[in-house]
Image: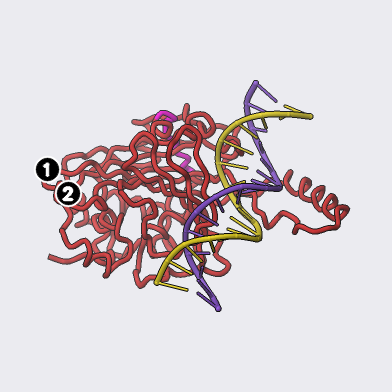
Chain colours: A red, B purple, C yellow
Amino acid sequence: MAKDKDHYGYDPFYYNHDELNQTSFPFLRDNSHSTPTQNLQGFDPSITSFTDCLHGSMDYNTLSRAFDLSCSSSEVISSIDDNPKKPSTGDSVGIIRRNPGTPNSSSVSSSSTEAEVITQEDSSAKSKKDKQPKGDDEDADEKSKKENKAKKKEKKPREPRFAFLTKSEVDHLEDGYRWRKYGQKAVKNSPYPRSYYRCTSQKCIVKKRVERSFQDPTIVITTYEGQHNHHCPATLRGSAASMLSSHSLFNSPSMGPSIPQDLLSQLLPSYTQNDHQDSMFHQNITHHPQHHHQQQQQQQFPFNHDYGLLQDLLPSFPGKQEP
DNA sequence: CGGATTTGACCTGCGC
DNA sequence: GCGCAGGTCAAATCCG
């Protein structure tokens, strides 16, 4: 389909691990010894939730500090998009990954094992809103088609995309927002279909795609597109949904991190060729065991699959149980 | 009965 | 220009 690569401003060949670790993402560095919880101590007290971070009040630096302090147990792959040939979108791509758990984690439910975050520029700015309504008037149809063609030439800035990789048995992860499924497509070279969801909130254009990695079927790739223009329906102060849907997290113009094509193509067959210009960074976070009250947590907080990560990152994250 | 999901058809952009 | 693949629509169906 629309080969996303033409819409992305990133080039995996500009990927430079070490350099970018220290420049673009100083907060993402390899410190695989410490646990996330240890790093929470220095967390910016002004940050009370991801929602706070992502609904416009936080800049990149603040977040950088936040991640620096909260996620120092990380490994980073990133790059800057400085390829002048490609349109710079200011959006970035990234992964936050939880490493496999310790032996103790074997008793932990599958929902709390691993999560990654990726952002990327969307490839599908096209919207049926631009399409003319179906009618009997063929002349009108043709006219509107021509108009559409003209419109198409003006490339719309695409909504930022933010992918979230989660190790989960459940495809559609709860994130606090309400979604309506509007499509499902088979993905080339993958036995797993891709599902398309749209935020059910009125006038909210946020969409997300959910697919399973063909390489590691335990990994669910959830790609958010756009930014919610409303609060999370759930009574949570922060959610990964808002984080993922907001480009404010990593939208510094200086950030155009690229991810090696290999990484994505390992996970998504469709990225192998078509999305080779997608870019991202990734961050490894050491895993630590979650507590065992999964059901109880789900009742308290709907973001039942990934919030373990956010709990690690945010002391005040909803549902975090103080010792 | 209303909202959510399913699913085939259609549209669009890209590569050849 | 054609075929392919991704993305979306919308009628049919499901479900609480």
Q: Which numbered mark, 2 or 1, is in the foreground of this view?
A: 1
Task: Please tell me which residue is depicted at 35% across the width and 50% down the height of the picture.
Answer: A64
In the image, residue A276 above or below residue A174: above
* Picture quarter with the C terminus of chain A: bottom left
Residue A251 shows up from this direction? no
Span of residues in magenta: A254-262
The image's mark for residue A103 is 1
Nearer to the camera, A116 or A50: A116
| Kind of residue indicated by mark 2 | His
State the image quarter where residue A299 is shown: bottom left
Q: Position of residue A48 (x, y in %)?
A: 31, 66
State the image quarter where residue A286 is shown: top left
Crowding near pointer 2: few (<14 within 10 Å), some, many (20+)? Answer: many
Q: Secondary structure at mark 1?
A: helix
Q: Position of residue A267 (x, y in %)?
A: 39, 35
Task: Please tell me which residue is depicted at 42% across the width and 34% down the height of the picture.
Answer: A264
Left or right placement of residue A322 versus residue B10 in this view: left
Residue A163 shows up from this direction? yes
Which chain does the numbered disc 2 sit on?
A
Nearer to the camera, A193 or A283: A193
Task: Please tell me if label 2 and label 1 are on a single chain.
Answer: yes
